[in-house]
Image: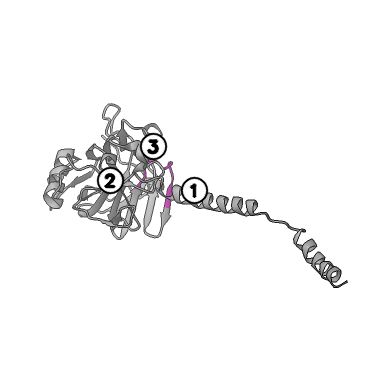
Amino acid sequence: MKMKNKEKQKDPIRNKRNKNPISAKQRLYTSFLLMLLALVAVTAATVAWFSIADNTKVKSMSLDIVSGVDLRMDLDPHKTLEEYVKTLSFDQIAERIQKEKGFSMKETPLEPVTTQDEEVFTFENGTIAESTSGVYLEFTLHFMAAKDMVVHLTSADSSETAGDGTEVLSENAALPASMRISFSTDGKTWIYDPGMENISVTEGNTKNFGLPEKSMMELNEDNAMFSMKEGIKKEVKVHIWMEGTDPACNDGLKGADYAIRLRFTGTDENGQPFSEQ
């Protein structure tokens, strides 16, 4: 009798456990899914970056800068408008960077970095990338205008045959989207993102913007940057880098060449462009 009573006492417990049976196989399967999801999350966070290896660097670049009517610039400040120029070539910029930073743009390729403030740049592992390392470019442009104006970056050419509008070109069609070019002055920063649509997004003192194709280019608030006063010089710090967190910045860009053209122009206080004549 005692044995039967014990067995009866065990029965309810056994029955209760069998209501929601979870086998060891199911628990193992659930654990595997969780591990797989964690792996996918880590991979998604890092897939954009180049692998850390010498053969993943972008191979070479060219850079030319053009200013529009009534706007001049140079790598040094001057007292009068006549001392400034309308164009700066790759060789001029490379020579200045060699002098100030100690590396050759012709021999030192860019590497993926990222930044939160357009001043401090870091690698994927969080290590600070020095401006003298050549993994990104830093130089200063000095502007002066013949009239009060708002300066814009434009993809339009100055004439039908000029071919001087802002553009990032590469044999690898995916590369331009990974590039960023920033312009900082007056406590504000404007970042040109070639992979961004013809819109702008402003957060605090930083505006990110894209440009349309040259045939669709219009000067508006999306591509407007800093203001100029007639005859007053303005110093603008420029950074050029490959944004490691951009999905386009992956190993598919290994060894690619690229070329950058930047063209600045201006509008008056009513947003009207100045004539190119």
> Which residue shows up at 28% across the image and 54% down it?
184
Q: Position of residue 275 (x, y in %)?
A: 29, 37
Residue at 23 percent of width and 52 percent of height: 230
Q: Earlier in the sequence, mark 1 or mark 3?
A: 1
List the residue tagged with mark 2.
Answer: 111
Asked whether, in this view, residue 92 is left or right of residue 189, the answer is left
Kind of residue indicated by mark 3:
Met
**Residue that numbered label 3 is attached to:** 217
Q: CA distance from mark 2 to mark 1?
A: 25 Å
Rendered image: mark on residue 40: 1
Question: Can residue 199 be found in the magenta stretch?
Answer: yes
Instruction: State the residue in front, 177 or 155.
Output: 177
| Mark seen at residue 165 | none
Q: Nearer the viewer, residue 263 or 3?
A: 3
The stretch in magenta equals: 192-201
Secondary element type, mark 3? loop
Amino acid of disc 1: Val
